[in-house]
Image (spheres, rainbow, N blue to C red):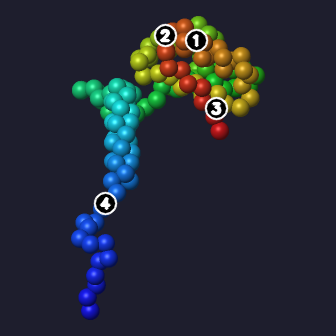
């Protein structure tokens, strides 16, 4: 069986408008996404690697616990208890300041005592002081 073309010897035509549109969309996609990646490369990570440090010291957080013992508020740094602002400041001056400090406040402690611990840490020179409520 033979098929004859009624239009003669015409070559098939290909409409390039849709291919040009798709190419333009891909080109614009790649231009916009490569520009967005350069801003992320300028960000510096918070994790830094130091040579010669003890890994155990890096994992132990520095914590000031604010708790009630009887009728008094006590500031506990490690195993030592401090009853006033001056003795807390002396104890915090011995700690390294670049690692930051956590202030853990237990139930029953008034807001003023928690604020005192945070303010003393700031006055001593800690830049990163984090409030942590105890459970």
Left or right, 27 with reference to 104 = left
Give coordinates of residue 72: x percent, y percent: 72, 20
Give coordinates of residue 123: x percent, y percent: 54, 8
Q: Which mark is residue 120?
A: 1
Q: Is 71 or 101 nearer to us in this picture?
A: 101
Q: Mark 1 and 2 residues: CB-CB less than 8 Å, in contact?
A: no
Please name the residue shown 48% across and 25% down the image: 62
Q: Which mark is residue 46?
A: none
Q: Which mark is residue 14?
A: 4
Residue 37 appears anywhere in the view? no
- Binning the other alpha carbons within 10 Å of mark 1 as few (below 14), some (14 to 19) or many (20 upward) gives some
Give coordinates of residue 103: x percent, y percent: 58, 24
Disc 3 to disc 4, how far (Cα)? 70 Å
Mark with earlier residue (1, 4): 4
Judged by depth in the image, the label closer to the viewer, 1 or 4, is: 4
Q: Is 44 or 111 nearer to us in this picture?
A: 44
Quadrant (top left, top right, bottom left, bottom right) of the N terminus: bottom left
- Binning the other alpha carbons within 10 Å of mark 2 as few (below 14), some (14 to 19) or many (20 upward) gives some
Give coordinates of residue 38: x percent, y percent: 34, 30
Judged by depth in the image, the label closer to the viewer, 3 or 4, is: 4
Q: Which mark is residue 133?
A: 3
Mark with earlier residue (3, 4): 4
Residue 61 appears anywhere in the view? yes
Q: Which residue is mark 2?
A: 125
Disc 2 to disc 4, how far (Cα)? 74 Å
Disc 1 to disc 2, how far (Cα)? 9 Å
Element type at marker 3?
strand
Disc 1 to disc 4, how far (Cα)? 78 Å
Please name the residue shown 31% across and 60% down the image: 14
């Amino acid at each position: 069986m033979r098929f004859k073309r009624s239009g003669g010897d015409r070559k098939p035509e290909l409409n390039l408008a849709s291919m040009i549109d798709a190419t333009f969309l891909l080109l614009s996609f790649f231009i916009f996404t490569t520009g967005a990646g350069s801003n992320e490369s300028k960000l510096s990570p918070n994790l830094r690697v130091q040579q010669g440090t003890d890994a155990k010291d890096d994992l132990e957080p520095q914590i000031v616990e604010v708790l009630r013992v009887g009728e008094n508020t006590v500031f506990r740094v490690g195993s030592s208890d401090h009853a006033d602002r001056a003795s807390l400041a002396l104890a915090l001056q011995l700690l390294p300041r670049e690692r930051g400090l956590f202030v853990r406040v237990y139930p029953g402690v008034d807001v003023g005592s928690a604020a005192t611990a945070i303010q003393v840490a700031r006055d001593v020179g800690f830049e990163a002081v984090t409030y942590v409520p105890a459970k």
